[in-house]
Image (tube, rainbow, N blue to C red):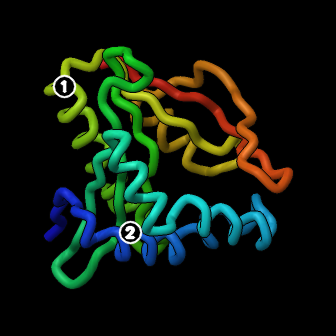
């Protein structure tokens, strides 16, 4: 049985471990190993996750009956607007295609509506296969942005939104 539960700071090590398991399969064909390692260390340190929580990012963990299999983070009132932003959403590769990502998006929509958001937004790497997944769930591409993250690295993203 799949459960989606609110994560606490005690779960940040689990989120970090999951990111290190998921990212190589998700981004290994897009990013160099050096960039992948840099981004994982920067984005998934316990300190960074704690800083995100201090900026009103909320974390959810996905569990099946035996283990943790994914996570999501989101923020209401993104940029001071009636918008909910999905910052991170990942499930283990062997669980992809089983509806878990869709469950997370549905949970985000429910939470966004409860927070009186009128849009759900996210960024996704332009070369990530997840672009088609988000389109199937009603997201549209509203722009592109290149985000400098240090050491000469860029995140080359589509900006996507879904009206609620």
Where 146 sits versus 89, above or below?
above
Residue 141, image x and y in percent?
A: 58, 24
What is the CA distance from the residue labelled 1 to the residue labelled 2?
24 Å
Instruction: Please report the residue visible at 33 percent of the width from the left and 72 percent of the height from the top.
Output: 69
From the image, which quarter does the N terminus lie in? Answer: bottom left
Left or right: residue 51 versus residue 131 is left
Residue at numbered disc 2:
15
User: CB of mark 1 within 8 Å of CB of mark 2?
Assistant: no
For marks 1 and 2, the one nearer the N-term is 2
Neighbour tally class for label 1: few under 14, some 14-19, many 20 plus, Cα within 10 Å: some
Residue 110, image x and y in percent?
A: 18, 34
Residue 11 appears in view: yes
Q: How many marks?
A: 2
Left or right: residue 47 versus residue 164 is right
Residue 89, image x and y in percent?
A: 42, 52
In front of the other: 136 or 9? 9
Rendered image quadrant of residue 6:
bottom left
Where 95 sits versus 121, above or below?
below
Left or right: residue 115 versus residue 41 is left
Tag 1, which secondary structure?
Answer: loop
From the image, which quarter does the C terminus lie in? Answer: top left
**Label for residue 53?**
none
Neighbour tally class for label 2: few under 14, some 14-19, many 20 plus, Cα within 10 Å: many
In front of the other: 114 or 142? 114
The residue sitting at the bottom extreme is 66
Instruction: Please report the residue visible at 45 percent of the width from the left and 36 percent of the height from the top.
Output: 136
The residue sitting at the right extreme is 152
Where 107 sits versus 42, above or below?
above
Residue at numbered disc 1:
115
Tag 2, which secondary structure?
Answer: helix
Instruction: Please report the residue visible at 77 percent of the width from the left and 46 percent of the height from the top.
Output: 154
């Amino acid at each position: 049985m799949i459960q989606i539960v609110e994560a606490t700071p005690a779960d940040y090590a689990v989120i970090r471990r999951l990111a290190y398991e998921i990212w190589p399969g998700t981004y290994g064909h897009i990013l160099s190993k050096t960039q992948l390692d840099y981004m994982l260390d920067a984005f998934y340190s316990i300190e960074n996750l704690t800083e995100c929580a201090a900026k009103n990012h909320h974390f959810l963990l996905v569990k099946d009956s035996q283990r943790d299999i994914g996570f999501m983070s989101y923020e209401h009132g993104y940029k001071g607007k009636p918008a909910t932003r999905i910052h991170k959403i990942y499930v283990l590769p062997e669980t992809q295609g089983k509806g878990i990502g869709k469950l997370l998006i549905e949970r985000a929509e429910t939470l966004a509506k409860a927070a009186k958001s009128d849009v759900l937004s996210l960024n996704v790497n332009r070369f990530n296969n997840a672009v088609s997944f988000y389109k199937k769930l009603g997201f549209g591409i509203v722009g592109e942005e290149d985000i400098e993250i240090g050491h000469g690295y860029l995140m080359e993203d589509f900006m996507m939104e879904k009206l609620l």
